[in-house]
Image: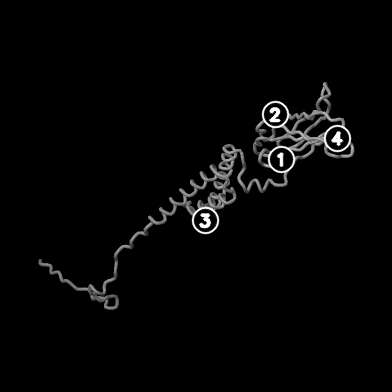
Amino acid sequence: MTMELQFVASKPNIQSARPFASPAEQPDITPPTPPNRSGASRLRYTLIIAVALEFLFLATSSMGPLIVFLAIWVSLGIALNADAFTRWTVGLVFAAILVTVGTAIAVLRTGHVPLSVAKWEQGAPQLSLVSSTGYESKSGSYRVVEGQVKNLSWKPLKDVVVRSTWLDETGKFVASKGALIEHNPILPGQTSAFRTMAIADPAMSLYHVEFESVGGGPLDVEDDRAAE
């Protein structure tokens, strides 16, 4: 028995057919070129180097910490690879740390605070006069003033001079004598003894003490002597 197979062609769906596009009409399927990040990387490295240079400049000079803080913060805020909130927050923290460390190094290296910090300290007493006593030496040849003074500032103070001025009963000037205090420099929070000796004068009746820095002018002093 012979079985005959017949091929029945399916009827094409004309509606779903699409014309063949010529080469000129074919869409451009060239893969997109990846973005060039070399420029951003160079900028990031440049800003990081700038942060390092700003820190070194602060640690080796008297440049104002506020200026360096803002410069480091902005540089880190741009250079860090994160979302905006993280970049600026982390930049703020790191800028504060770097400026604090840099300022401390500058103070320890030079013995002087940067200009902007010094201006901020203006008006605050630098020294505390803890005690003072004026008396005549055993020989009667000298008038002695001695006592203790404390450094209230956060920096070492070099070449601090105590100056004792003697007055008569009416407050008229009689004599003045200066001398370096015992500790040089006097460190933050440290207390130092001082002593001056002036040739005795019968008119000497009252005295007062002042403090100054050699080449730096008078120092602000808080009188913390116990009431007599």
- Residue 84's label in the rendered image is 3
* Image marks 2 and 3: residues in contact by CB distance under 8 Å: no
Whether 127 is drawn above or below 45: the answer is: above
Considering every residue shown, the one lying at the far right of the view is 169
Q: Which residue was labeled with disc 2? A: 182
The amino acid type found where label 4 is placed reads Leu
Looking at the image, which is closer to me, 114 or 71?
114
Say which label, 1 or 3, has the lower sequence index: 3
Q: Give SS at disc 4.
A: strand
Say which label, 4 or 1, has the lower sequence index: 1
Q: Comparing marks 2 and 3, which lies closer to the viewer?
A: 2
Which residue is drawn at the image coordinates 87% and 36% (left, top)? 168
Q: Comparing marks 4 and 1, which lies closer to the viewer?
A: 4
**Residue 206, image quadrant:** top right
* Image marks 1 and 3: residues in contact by CB distance under 8 Å: no
Q: CA distance from mark 2 to mark 1?
A: 17 Å
Q: Comparing marks 4 and 2, which lies closer to the viewer?
A: 4
Which residue is drawn at the image coordinates 23% and 74% (left, top)? 22
The amino acid type found where label 1 is placed reads Gln
Q: Give SS at disc 1.
A: loop
Left or right: 200, with 104 as reference point: right
Q: Which residue was labeled with disc 1? A: 126
Left or right: 146, with 10 as reference point: right
Task: Please provide percent x and percent y for residue 220.
Answer: 73, 42
Q: CA distance from mark 4 to mark 1?
A: 25 Å
Whether 112 is drawn above or below 8: the answer is: above
Whether 88 is drawn above or below 112: the answer is: below
